[in-house]
């Protein structure tokens, strides 16, 4: 991945990696990760696209201030300003996990900034983050909290999010644990987790049908954290949407099946631009 | 078949509710266990106290959603916060925690839980900016790090039982942390002690090493010093063995400690010099005889009774502090032989020199006498005055010859002296008055006599000669005039510097100095000025006998003469004459008398020289005696034995061929002891006769003598005998 660039947007510090050339593509990560989650996708895209992988507020190299609004709506508004700042609209937006939720809000609120919309194992509606009792009969949010202080718990959480669990080596685990590497990172992570509120998505449920953008929904069927129902329902609600599935992909399908993801994205972007 | 009873939905719901409640408890329990495990895992690798508090507060806050937690020290009425954690803010909020004495006493019994709103009721005043606690728990703790520690957890949740439920796990986690802190501190202490121990071991090792090095150095230095001492001892021993002098070191009891090889050559003096042998005598003289003072070494001469004769100089010096003494013996036999040879050679040379001088002067006189005598033989003039003049000149030449002889005899100390007690003050004053007529007017005298008597026993005639010679020398040294200063003083009033007195320093002396402001004596001449016939004056201006005469006279009176001179500045001669005490002899000076006349008594004149014999015979007759002459002692005895005329006195020369005067006197004492004998000689009696004395020896006449001398001597003897 390229080196990080830091940009002040609305007095907030946003960090991003940018590489390649072509139509701009904005990659938005989810919770427990940051822009590194796209590290195996970017090489497949940067040959034809100007790929920008951003760290959300409270994550990675971006602002960790606890005084900020970490809600997905606020994050979406900050990214809209970011796209303006960079002057890259219209743009292909790809969102994973809560990044999918942010992408939905962007598509509904700022459709003119987008050339296309891609949702990879996204949150949606009120199905999130209410995955009921799974591991240790503890809610996922509780697991996330415990993950900040317990490497073992984080490892368990990550491992369960992969289809190919053998891929979780020390190097990859180190990238995830980097999210918790300091008190500031841990506090910011907890604040981000605490800011997750399904109200922000349920409030746009009705507007999903107004999205007039080429939309691709990628679903790893091995994702045990987010329900398949979310993707199915989004595919039903968003016009011109296409749902692609892969059985060997977990929640982090970018790690399980990066080629499949990258190929689908390129193909979709080309179609969308046609 | 038992009919199946449809489940009661209410019961099922109740059961589910119970199960969920139980599940909740189990979850919490699982989290508690996880926290304990987590803390144990996280604290183990920590090595410092600071991160332990930080980790503890953060983990508890995050896990139990506690917005504010802190650790502090209990003071008199408050808590000093040392570590804090705030979950929802970046900055640590300002916090105040006041404790009443009641609350503090309560904490002595254990943890204190109070609701946020009623905290003050419990004596706890807690204010945290941005936090509205519903519950506050205070957990006291103690460890080596802090004996009055306290943890504070502020909870915002609505569940009033939340913190009471977590008390046990919180205390367990805190105990875990405190144990870890104790372990760390103990480890630190242990490490510090180990380090101290290592340092001490290292220091001791360094000290030991240093001490060992110092010891080695000291051993090497001592070895070196010992080698040096041994080397020095060997060198000293070698030097000692190579010394030509014999050296014997004695202990305080005069036992031989060591003796060198040269001592063996002194065997005639010392029989045995083996270590331990007591040395009491050296050459039959007791050791005490050789003892020197601490500052001066006295060398005593010891002659060994051996053949050839061996002469040693021996000195014994004490080593001080009863450390014994060292004896040094040096064989000076060869030196004595050489010295005697040298002295003999010098004497021969001096005699030769003296003889040459005498021959020269006498030749001149004789030459003149012979010319005058021949002139008289050839003189046909009937004028008797002419012959008388020549005769007077011959007599004058005879006086000069007699004067010359007197000077030589003075030098050789052969003059018959007539010493008498003289007060030099008066004598010098009178002599100066006489000398004033002899010296040029440009030269003047200064006489400075110290108060008191200055008595010496001296022949006044000779002393006058001394002063005359010195004064004339001084006046000649001051051709352009000047001052002759004569000083007179006693040694007891003003001693001379020690180097002017080589011995007899304690004796009393009268000093008489004659100083001039003349040309001085050249350095090269100074060693010879007292030698006879040595002169720096022009030919014809001096005989070279003046100072030699003075030297002889002074020596004859047991005195000394020293001089100091500087060219161009002048010369000072100082006579040292032994001081005397007593009453002055009566002044015998009187009006000139005619020589006493004899009464035809027969005097036998014995003289080998015919001229002198004849003259003496004539002279005796002129003095009123009758005279018979004999040419030697044998002839004289014959005449005495044969003549019928009574010989009343024998006047004999001493040195004659055949029987001399002394033998004659001796023989006459045997044959005719009543006849007094008067011996005449150019030599002093102690020299010529070796201290000869005989009852018939009436007087000793020193040649040349005056007519008056002879007349007085004869008259005294014969008047006494008659």
Image (cartoon, helix red, strand yellow):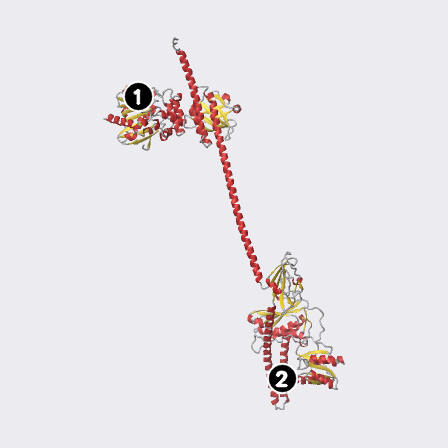
Cα distance, mark 1 to mark 2? 186 Å
Residue B243, can we see it? Answer: yes
Residue B275 or residue B413, whichever sits in front: B275
* Quadrant housing residue A126: top left
* Quadrant housing residue B588: bottom right
Q: Which residue in the structure is indicated by mark 1?
A: A231
Residue B26 or residue B300, whichever sits in front: B26
**Dot 1 lies on which element?**
helix
Vertical placement of residue A193 versus B666, above or below? above
> Do the residues at pointers 1 and 2 share their chain?
no
Q: Nearer the viewer, mark 1 or mark 2?
A: 1
Residue A1 or residue B387, whichever sits in front: A1
**Dot 2 lies on which element?**
helix
Residue under the image location 66 percent in, 85 percent down: B610
* Quadrant housing residue B418: bottom right
Residue under the image location 63 percent in, 87 percent down: B387
Vertical placement of residue B554 versus B636, above or below? above
* Residue B254 x/y as whole percent: 65, 59
């Amino acid at each position: 991945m390229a080196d990080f660039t830091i940009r002040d947007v609305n007095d907030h510090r946003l960090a991003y990696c940018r590489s390649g050339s072509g139509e701009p593509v904005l990659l938005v990560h989810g919770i427990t990760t940051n822009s590194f989650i796209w590290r195996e996708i970017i090489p497949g895209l940067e040959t034809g696209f100007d790929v920008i992988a951003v760290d959300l507020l409270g994550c990675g190299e971006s602002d960790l201030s606890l005084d900020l609004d970490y809600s997905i709506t606020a994050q979406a508004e900050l990214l809209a300003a970011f796209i303006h700042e960079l002057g890259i609209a219209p743009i292909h937006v790809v969102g994973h996990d809560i990044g999918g939720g942010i992408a939905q809000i962007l598509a509904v609120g700022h459709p003119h900034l987008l050339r296309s919309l891609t949702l990879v194992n996204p949150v949606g509606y009120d199905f999130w983050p209410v995955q009921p009792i799974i591991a240790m009969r503890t809610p996922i949010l509780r697991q996330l909290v415990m993950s900040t202080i317990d490497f073992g718990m984080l490892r368990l959480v990550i491992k369960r999010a992969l289809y190919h669990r053998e891929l979780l080596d020390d190097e990859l685990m180190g990238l995830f644990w980097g999210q918790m590497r300091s008190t500031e990172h841990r506090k910011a992570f907890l604040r981000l987790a605490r800011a997750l509120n399904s109200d922000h998505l349920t409030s746009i449920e009705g507007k999903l049908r107004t999205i007039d953008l080429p939309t691709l929904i990628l679903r790893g069927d091995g994702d045990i954290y987010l329900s398949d129902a979310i993707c199915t329902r989004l595919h039903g609600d968003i016009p011109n949407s296409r749902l692609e599935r892969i059985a060997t992909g977990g929640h982090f399908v970018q790690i399980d099946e990066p080629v499949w993801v990258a190929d689908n994205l390129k193909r979709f972007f080309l179609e969308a631009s046609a | 078949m038992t009919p199946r009873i449809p489940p009661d939905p209410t019961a099922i719901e109740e059961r589910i509710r119970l199960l969920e409640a139980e599940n909740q408890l189990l979850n919490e329990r699982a989290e508690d266990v996880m926290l304990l495990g987590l803390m144990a895992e996280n604290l183990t690798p920590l090595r410092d106290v600071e991160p332990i508090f930080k980790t503890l507060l953060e983990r508890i806050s995050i896990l139990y959603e506690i917005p504010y937690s802190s650790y502090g020290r209990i003071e008199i009425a408050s808590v000093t916060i040392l570590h804090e954690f705030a979950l929802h803010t970046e900055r640590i909020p300002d916090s105040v925690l006041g404790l009443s004495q009641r609350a503090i006493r309560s904490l002595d019994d254990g943890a204190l839980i109070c609701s946020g709103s009623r905290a003050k009721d419990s004596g706890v005043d807690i204010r945290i900016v941005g936090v509205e606690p519903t519950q506050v728990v205070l957990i006291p703790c103690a460890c080596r790090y802090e004996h009055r520690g306290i943890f504070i957890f502020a909870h915002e949740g609505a569940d009033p039982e939340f913190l009471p439920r977590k008390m046990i796990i919180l205390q367990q986690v805190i105990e875990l942390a405190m144990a870890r802190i104790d372990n760390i501190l103990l480890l630190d202490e242990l490490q510090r002690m180990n380090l101290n121990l290592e340092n001490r071991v290292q220091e001791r090792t360094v000290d030991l090493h240093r001490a060992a090095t110092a010891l080695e150095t000291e051993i090497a230095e001592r070895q070196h010093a010992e080698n040096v001492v041994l080397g020095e001892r060997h060198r000293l021993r070698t030097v000692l063995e190579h010394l030509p002098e014999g050296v014997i070191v004695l202990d305080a009891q005069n036992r031989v400690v060591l003796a060198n090889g040269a001592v063996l050559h002194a065997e005639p003096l010392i029989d045995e010099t083996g270590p331990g042998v007591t040395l009491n005598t050296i050459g039959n003289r007791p050791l005490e005889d050789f003892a020197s003072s601490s500052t001066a070494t006295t060398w005593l001469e010891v002659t060994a009774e051996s053949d050839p004769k061996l002469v040693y100089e021996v000195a014994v010096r004490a080593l001080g502090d009863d450390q014994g003494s060292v004896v040094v013996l040096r064989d000076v036999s060869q030196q004595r032989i050489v010295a005697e040879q040298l002295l003999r050679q010098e004497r021969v040379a001096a005699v030769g020199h003296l003889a040459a001088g005498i021959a020269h002067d006498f030749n001149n006189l004789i030459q003149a006498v012979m010319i005058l005598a021949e002139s008289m033989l050839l003189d046909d003039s009937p004028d008797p005055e002419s012959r008388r003049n020549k005769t007077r000149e011959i007599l004058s030449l005879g006086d000069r010859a007699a004067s010359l002889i007197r000077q030589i005899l003075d030098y050789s100390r052969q003059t018959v002296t007539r010493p008498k007690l003289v007060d030099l003050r008066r004598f010098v004053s009178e002599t100066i008055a006489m000398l004033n007529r002899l010296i040029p007017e440009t030269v003047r005298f200064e006489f400075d006599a110290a108060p008191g008597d200055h008595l010496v026993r001296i022949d006044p005639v000779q002393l006058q000669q001394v002063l005359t010679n010195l004064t004339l020398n001084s006046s000649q040294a001051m051709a352009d005039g000047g001052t002759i200063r004569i000083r007179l003083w006693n040694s007891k009033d003003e001693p001379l510097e020690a180097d002017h007195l080589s011995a007899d320093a304690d004796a009393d002396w009268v000093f008489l100095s004659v100083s001039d402001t003349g040309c001085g004596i050249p350095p090269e001449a100074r060693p010879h000025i007292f030698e006879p016939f040595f002169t720096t004056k022009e030919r014809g201006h001096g005989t070279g006998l003046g100072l030699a005469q003075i030297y002889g006279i002074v020596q004859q009176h047991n005195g000394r003469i020293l001089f100091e001179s500087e060219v161009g500045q002048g010369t000072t001669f100082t006579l040292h004459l032994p001081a005397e005490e007593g009453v002055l002899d009566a002044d015998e000076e009187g009006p000139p008398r005619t020589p006493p006349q004899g009464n035809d008594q027969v005097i036998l004149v014995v003289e080998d020289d015919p001229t002198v014999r004849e003259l003496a015979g004539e002279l005796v007759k002129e003095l009123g005696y009758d005279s018979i002459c004999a040419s030697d002692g044998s002839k004289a005895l014959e005449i005495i034995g044969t003549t019928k005329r009574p010989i009343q006195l024998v006047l004999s020369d001493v040195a004659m061929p055949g029987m001399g005067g002394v033998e004659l006197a001796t023989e006459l004492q045997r044959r005719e002891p009543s006849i007094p004998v008067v011996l005449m000689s150019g030599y002093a009696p102690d020299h010529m006769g070796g201290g000869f004395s005989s009852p018939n020896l009436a007087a000793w006449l020193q040649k040349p003598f005056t007519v008056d001398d002879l007349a007085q001597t004869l008259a005294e003897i014969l008047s006494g005998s008659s």
